[in-house]
Amino acid sequence: LHAIVIASFEGEQMLCYEIFCNDNSDMDDILKTVAKPETKTVAFGFMPKDTTDCQCRILENEDQLFVLKDKENMFNSSKMMLPLLSHA
């Protein structure tokens, strides 16, 4: 599939940190290939282009992002996240 996947597994969940592939690659095919037989759910560590079959939820952790008061806040108008691999 000409893709590189960075993922971890815990029980029935796969945490997919990132997928590096061509723009025309099918993410479902890649995930099905990488998933273990016991994998039931996939959590993304990035914002997929197509979120049609996804459920979004707020991540509760110790990471902080500061947004200036009275300035544009891109998180208010759309569902998005900073990739987990971008965290230092």
Image (cartoon, rainbow, N blue to C red):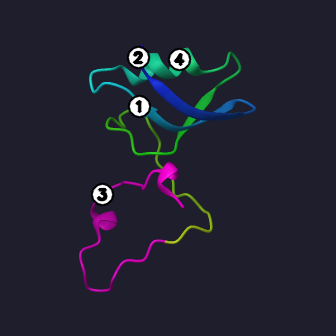
Q: Amino acid at mark 1?
A: Phe
Give the image location of residue 43, x and y in percent: 55, 39
Q: Earlier in the sequence, mark 2 or mark 1?
A: 2
Q: CA distance from mark 2 to mark 3?
A: 31 Å
Q: Amino acid at mark 2?
A: His
Q: Amino acid at mark 3?
A: Ser
Q: Which residue is mark 1?
A: 20
Taking the image as shown, residue 34 lies to the left or right of residue 66, namely: right
Residue 42 is drawn in which quadrant?
top right
Label 2: how many Cα within 10 Å (few below 14, some 14–19, many 20+): few
Q: Amino acid at mark 4?
A: Lys
Q: Which residue is mark 2?
A: 2
Q: CA distance from mark 4 to mark 1?
A: 15 Å
Q: Earlier in the sequence, mark 1 or mark 3?
A: 1
State the extent of the magenta-drawn residues as a range.
65-88
Label 3: how many Cα within 10 Å (few below 14, some 14–19, many 20+): few
Q: CA distance from mark 4 to mark 3?
A: 28 Å
Q: Which residue is mark 3?
A: 78
Taking the image as shown, residue 87 lies to the left or right of residue 49, namely: right
Q: Which residue is mark 4?
A: 32
